[in-house]
Image: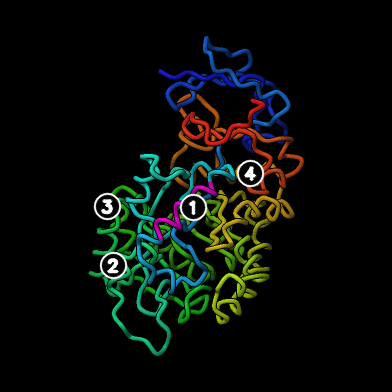
Amino acid sequence: MTLKLLKNARIVDGTAPEPTDPMGIVIEDGKIRDVGPGVTADTDEVLDMEGLTVMPGLVDCHVHVIATTANLGLNAALPSSLVAARSSLLMRDMIMRGFTTVRDLGGADRGLQQAVDESAFLGPRLVICGKALSQSGGHTDYRGPYSNRDVSWYASSLGAMGRICDGIPEVQRAAREEIKNGAQFVKVMADGGVSSPSDPVGYLVFSVEELKAAVEIAKGFGTYATGHLYSDEAIVRALDCGFECIEHGNLIGDDTIARIARDGIPVVPTNITYDLLHRKGAEFGLPAESVAKISDVREAGLERLEKFHEAGVLMGYGSDLLGGMQTEQSGEFPLRGRYLPADAVIRSATVDAAKVLRMEGEIGTIAPGAHADIIAVEGNPLDDLELLTHQGAHMPLILKAGEAVKQAASL
């Protein structure tokens, strides 16, 4: 049995506009055993959090740990061994920014997940969908108009974000195979996108019957389907087919916002990626035709943040960055902070993120029974969200499952 005590911990988790009074946090075998004022334990390992803000480990609800370059067609063609090696570095950097859990929305497989679980790779806890489901000419089909070569190899290439499936039987098979292979939910490219050549935003890619087939398989396995979605028409269509989460949602209409608030459907905005792609996409290898699509969704996505908040929509923190742009993962905090209260921004990466991942009480909270994923921050992020940026420079302590990933000598 391993026992650890954090004393004088003033906790910020986004559920209140001010830090708590000083608390004691007892960690036992990777889980939080007890937390509260005056809580203590007989242990040799005591960390004094005086002068620091203590937070749950951060959760990013939308990443692509296999996206080693913004040119996703090229990434899909890379050797899986090279992608895995580069992915290990991307994941290491994520956890050093304080993200102790991430939800991968296309590409990561059970092998990467197991490598992290076994500590072969240093990285956040991975929640995966396997390959996203796309169809010919849709998002994650990286063939241009002059290529009709077979892409069945996408399904077994670690660098491919998705796989192609056309028609109800293929959609059913693909969804079943991904779940068999370890997927914890099903991701469907239910709208056009920015990073692929043939599908403008608002392109209603899968048929209604295909969308319903993916949802039926997901629900049959006890999980859910989420959709890559921008336009209001595509979002309404997906909701009507039974989708239970929305990724992006930049062009959603007011009536649909009211609907998802009423029905408890979460949305994961990913505005930092459009902000950065607008400024530097070409530098990171994004094709020119993809850069040109950015303006359609960038400003609209930022405008929707306030509408989501005012309507009471459950929002998860999402970055969705590709390749070298992943260094800006924490930039979503100050970007959202221009439009939302700081506690709401933080909550999207803690307790609300846990709800998106369906892991309430396990992550995103400092409470008995939760994983002991804890970070300490110099200063108060409720006053300055920039403290959560700069590659974890303001985080002298990062614990994942009670083990120190980073610990300053002064602690």
Residue 13 showing in the rendered view: yes
Residue pointed to by mark 3: 220
Q: What residue do we see at 63% from left, 36% from top?
A: 15
Disc 2 versus disc 3: nearer the observer: 2
Give the numbered dot on residue 171.
2
Up-down: is 81 above or below 372?
below
Q: What residue do we see at 35% from left, 78% from top?
A: 136
> Can you say which quadrant of the picture contains the C terminus?
top right
Q: CA distance from mark 3 to mark 1?
A: 36 Å
Task: Give the extent of the magenta segment.
Answer: 83-94
Report which quarter residue 29 is drawn in. top left
User: For the residue labelled by badge 1, is the local secondary structure a helix, a strand or a loop?
Assistant: helix
Q: CA distance from mark 3 to mark 4?
A: 40 Å
Q: Amino acid at mark 4?
A: Gly
> Can you say which quadrant of the picture contains the N terminus?
top left
Residue that protrudes farthest toward the right in the picture: 383
